[in-house]
Image (tube, grey):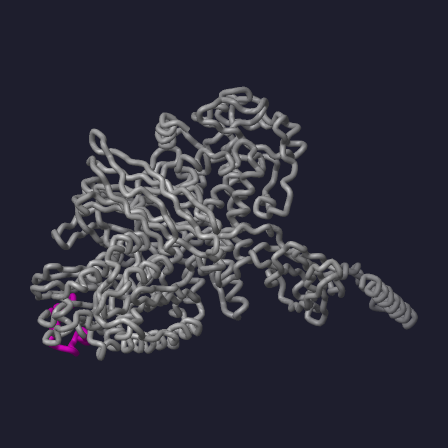
Amino acid sequence: MNPMQVVTVLVIISLPDLTKSFQPDYNILSDGVSFTHLMITETAILRKTAEVCRDIAADEGRDFTLNIDGSLTVSKVQRACSGTPSSTVPVSAVSFQNALSTIHDSNTRVDTKIKSALTAENHFDNEEFVAGRNIITEGVFAVKFNVLRGNFEVGRKTLGRICHTLQDFYSHSDWVELNNNKPYSALIIPSQPLTNLAGQDVPTCSSCTEDVCRDNILPNILERKLLTSGYFELFSKVKPAGKCSHGGAFDRTSREDPEGGINKDSVGSFHGYLHVNAATVAIDATIELLEDIRTAVGDKTFLQFMGVSQSSALSFVIDTTGSMADDIAAVKETSFSIIDSRRGTAEEPSVYILVPFHDPEFGPVIRTTDPDTFKAHINELTAKGGSGGLPEYSMSGLQLALTAAPPSSDIFLFTDAPAEDAHLKNTVLALIESTKSRVTFMLTDVVRGRDSQSSSDRFASSEGTLIYRDLARASGGQTIEVSKLNLIEGTAVIEDLSANAVVTVFQVTEDPGKPENFTFIVDAATSNIKIFITGISSLTFQLTSPSGVSQNSSEPSGPLASITTVGNLRRILVNGTNETGTWELSVSSSSAYSVKVTGQSSVNFLYNIVEKREGAHAGIDVQEGRPSSGGNVTLLVTVTGSDTAKVTHVSLYDSSGPTQINGTVQALDNNNFLAEFTEIPAGDYVVRLIGQESNPTSRSTPTMFQRQASTRIKTSSLTVTSLVATSILEPGSNISIPFTVSSNVNGTFMLQVNNDRSFDVAFPSSVSIDGVDGGTANGTGTLTVPADVNSGTDLTVTIQAQNTAGTEINFAVVRFSVVARVADMSGPVCEVVNISGICPHSSALCASSQWELTANLTDGVNGTGIERITRREGNGTFNTITVTDAGGVNVTMLTYNSSCCSQNVVLAAVDRVGNVGRCVGQARVLSTPTPMTVTNSTLNITTAASTTSHSRLSHGLLILGLIFLFLK
């Protein structure tokens, strides 16, 4: 594609008449009636996730009261899956919503990025059925592979892309015109052939010049059930003779004979009268795809993949040099206490992450969902080598933790030394801003030779802690400095921040310090209010409740709270009877300090920086990196944990100003809101939100709530983007990574590229921009994957650009997964050998009768082997033995037994790379006997008649017995 064509595409994609797919996004400028990719995908995910939680509850003997219907929401499904029907118990849906947002953003990019938007196989255009199916089946394999290895972010991005392609099949092909109302399963099962494809030389359409084309698919195509799809070309009008077009103002083929189109992308499309049919089957097909993934990875892993966990990760980055023995002991004590007290509860961490570091080594990352495995790894930590206070590789360790932990995690770093690798600060900042994770630094005696000072005073004066303070402030974490003797008291903050459904109500950093009065709102749905203040020992404060009651810092136990001080940290636990309304906190200090107010609540929010997109694909695009200084900023704000909450105010606050900028709020659908800000000055902002929550069963006045995002938004005059063709890499491969740097000023901009696996990268050291008012510089780098790297390794690349003065910085973050190519793309095969037993027709007699199924399962000579078999339907039990036949093939011999109260069974066999095969069986049921007509005359029976009746009954039982033996 030449540069002029690229510009043309960029213009056309934003125009209102280009309809190339199901509408991909939120109903901003769309018709509000048609199904969007978001609606299709989210409906399928909510239904399948709810089904998985229902099945788990049934297996565990628990109640599951949620109706799986069209009224599902993220909050409803999260609460039902958490097993907490009471609305008074805080349940966080942030991780679930984050996963959905990642999947949706990746789905949308198939339509909004030039290369994928115009590639026919991504949309099943131009009869590209084989290539389109390959995109899906290869993507499904990659999703399963990554999910099984905990690479959830890459798996979600891949899932979003293949969902888009799968869903487009039902809109762009004639599948629903052929009266199919079920998914085409061959699209996700590579071993099944694609049948009845219309050949290249087979005419498929007649011309249609109307707005609605009801009869333009040729009758013989419909009669023969031949599969075709519309042709779409933006720059050429050429298509095979007689073929259907996609249709639309920018499909040039639609104006060539045969004219018109067959797409069902919206109700206003050429075949829009079938739009709802296509969308309905697309939902079912997406559910079928999710079921295949669920079966391959297992129920609990599937829920982790979807982010359905109300508990957060427990993540530690630990310095293991010789001076850290006390710290390691404190980490053991704290982590073991958390693990043992929360095991088996709703607050049990969803994943455990451990990254050791010292000089010059760091890592490896330990990531596990098994608490005992995590405890074993922590037990293996020893303090050895090095010398206390000398710089260590803390940034390298933190980089690994940020790429391994789920988004929005709390990470705790322990050290007593400055950072040896401070050059990675901007890389770490990029990862913090990309993942929105919070980092709290537990520092013990970082600065040596200052014994005359208390630890809290060293916090303010030490240059060695500056990088830690900067990163804590950027992430919304804290820098806690204590002596080694008091570290255990300081680690209480870890239990506070890793608890269930923790929300940030208010947070601010004052640097330089000054006396200040702060206010924050406490709502009735938020409990366990805790306030953390860090600063030097001379800092004082006073807390005042909405009713005017006050307590100052000299009262460790007072009418409002209990206060403990350790090192530079004041930990204030507000009494359980805390009042709702506006609280005030007055702090007095001339040195830097920070304030953080948290609570536990279901109601929270997440946000993304976005750009509005108009036209037929009206919606929003998530923006990479930092927003532009002096430009407009749009945030997509999503409220979680409530289906009745309304956002009334969204502001950007910069405490260094101080500056507060209020945005204009627009309500969308599904608890989404757009907040638009104009001409944002250069600065460093946090997002603050005030909203109202109504009680749907009460007419009382809505209650106000306040929340604050932890991660800061920093503006930049630079923009860095990188769009890669794939997120899946093979061992021993090279991949080109294109990137773009834009600026409104000319100059040379330095590049710094890092990855968390230390793979070789080759990028230019700088790019130059020379235009009238700035401009754009394009470049390409290369990443080399070692041939011996383990399949399943995840990889994060950060690309940073900065001006020569180092005052303007921006970045792009790209995630990959290394997956070795495998030949086994076919699932295990099941051969039902026998079904024995006859079940009675009457359900009242079912418990006393049994039936049995025997089957042989194989994975072929070249298969990877059957790893596990699970029951997907039925209540019986099964056992297996594996033998090797004469041809060297492993055969799994299965026997399934069930009472006649459960007469159907579906068993799923999964091989070692995630391919799924199924065994389906049904019990034989005795046919309904002919009912005997009873009249008054039959009451006057004789002995002879009675004898005859008994004789006939015995004869009938004999016949039934013979039938039973014959069938068996």
In which image quadrant can residue 704 be found? bottom left
Asked if the magenta segment contains residue 113, the reply would be no
Magenta extent: 541-566
Choose top left, top right, bottom left or bottom right for residue 696. bottom left
Question: Is any atom of residue 365 visible in this view?
Answer: yes
Q: Residue at x 51, y 65 (%)?
A: 56
Q: Is residue 549 magenta?
A: yes
Viewed as shown, does residue 50 lie left or right of 668?
Answer: right
In this rendered view, identify the residue nearer to me: 313 or 359. Answer: 359
- Which image quarter: residue 848? bottom right
The answer, for residue 844, to whether it is visible in the render is no
Q: Is 862 in front, or is 310?
A: 862
Quadrant placement of the N terminus:
top left
454 lies above or below 963: below
Indicate whether 191 appears above or below 908: above
Question: Residue 142 in the image: x percent, y percent?
Answer: 50, 51
Q: Is residue 929 left or right of residue 191?
A: right
Give the side of residue 719 with respect to residue 679, left or right.
right
- Residue at 17%, 78% (x, y): give it: 557
What x and y, as percent, mark residue 698? 32, 59
**Image coords of residue 255 (percent x, y):** 49, 21
Total marks shown come to 0
Q: Nearer the viewer, residue 72 or 239?
A: 239
Q: Residue 859 in the image: x percent, y percent?
A: 65, 56
